[in-house]
Image: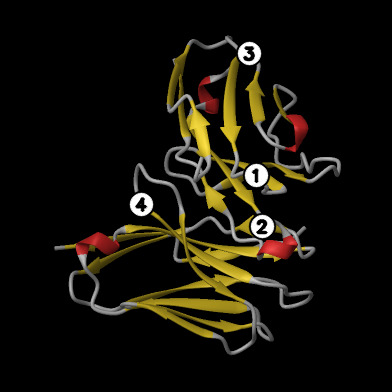
Amino acid sequence: ILNVEQSPQSLHVQEGDSTNFTCSFPSSNFYALHWYRWETAKSPEALFVMTLNGDEKKKGRISATLNTKEGYSYLYIKGSQPEDSATYLCALIQGAQKLVFGQGTRLTINP
Amino acid sequence: GAGVSQSPSNKVTEKGKDVELRCDPISGHTALYWYRQSLGQGLEFLIYFQGNSAPDKSGLPSDRFSAERTGGSVSTLTIQRTQQEDSAVYLCASSPGLAGGIRGFFGPGTRLTVL
């Protein structure tokens, strides 16, 4: 059974500060990793799809890195804004087909 | 439609009643997932359909939960004899599968409240 761990479970950050959180996974048989952003009352929305060790992806103030050898991915948010408040989910592809999600990191930006 | 749709958007039911939740995936997507999020909890996997393969039911919390996917398209999640702990947002996602990059597209969810 594939186990995807996210930490911390929740995070409160002051507006303007930068932050990051982690997704950990078994390094064997890696296929791809996804990051999703889930705002309250909305559907989770895909942010990044990462496949190669050393991948770095960026979308505005949000970026992500991937280390498949040690089994982790970091999501960074630079200069947090209130609209960044959401739950951030990572998901691993198991058996090259099935998405397996972590529990998510609930981010709250305090104005 | 352009995205994954779910119905109803909200469902309030009494303890002990049966409920059916519907998911219409994106046309052509071979994979379909059901998840739920209970209050204060993370995303919990329930069941996964991939093409014509036998579904992965490993996440269903009890035998009161069942799901089917007809014709490789629409899926229905049925909860029998609902309990208060079944209250959650039930999310459906579909994915184009290996050839399409596996990225999951989520529906808006069904908020189930069991009184």
State if disc 1 and disc 3 touch (CB < 8 Å): no
Q: CA distance from mark 2 to mark 3?
A: 29 Å
Circle number at residue A39:
4
Q: CA distance from mark 4 to mark 2?
A: 20 Å
Report in which chain the residue with disc 3 lies.
B
- The residue wearing badge 1 is B33
> Is A71 on the left-hand or right-hand side of A65?
right
Question: How many residues crowd around disc 4 within 10 Å: few (fewer than 14), some, or many (20 or more)?
Answer: some
Amino acid on which the number 1 mark rests in the picture: Tyr
Element class at badge 3: loop
Residue at 44%, 66% (x, y): give it.
Answer: A8
Above or below B17: residue A30: below
Question: Which quarter of the figure is the C terminus of chain A placed in?
Answer: bottom left
Above or below B79: residue B98: below
Closest to the observer, B7 or B67: B7
- The residue wearing badge 2 is A99
Q: CA distance from mark 4 to mark 3?
A: 31 Å
Residue at 31%, 78% (x, y): give it.
Answer: A61
Report in which chain the residue with disc 4 lies.
A
Above or below B2: residue A58: below
Res. A13 image quadrant: bottom left
State if disc 3 and disc 4 touch (CB < 8 Å): no
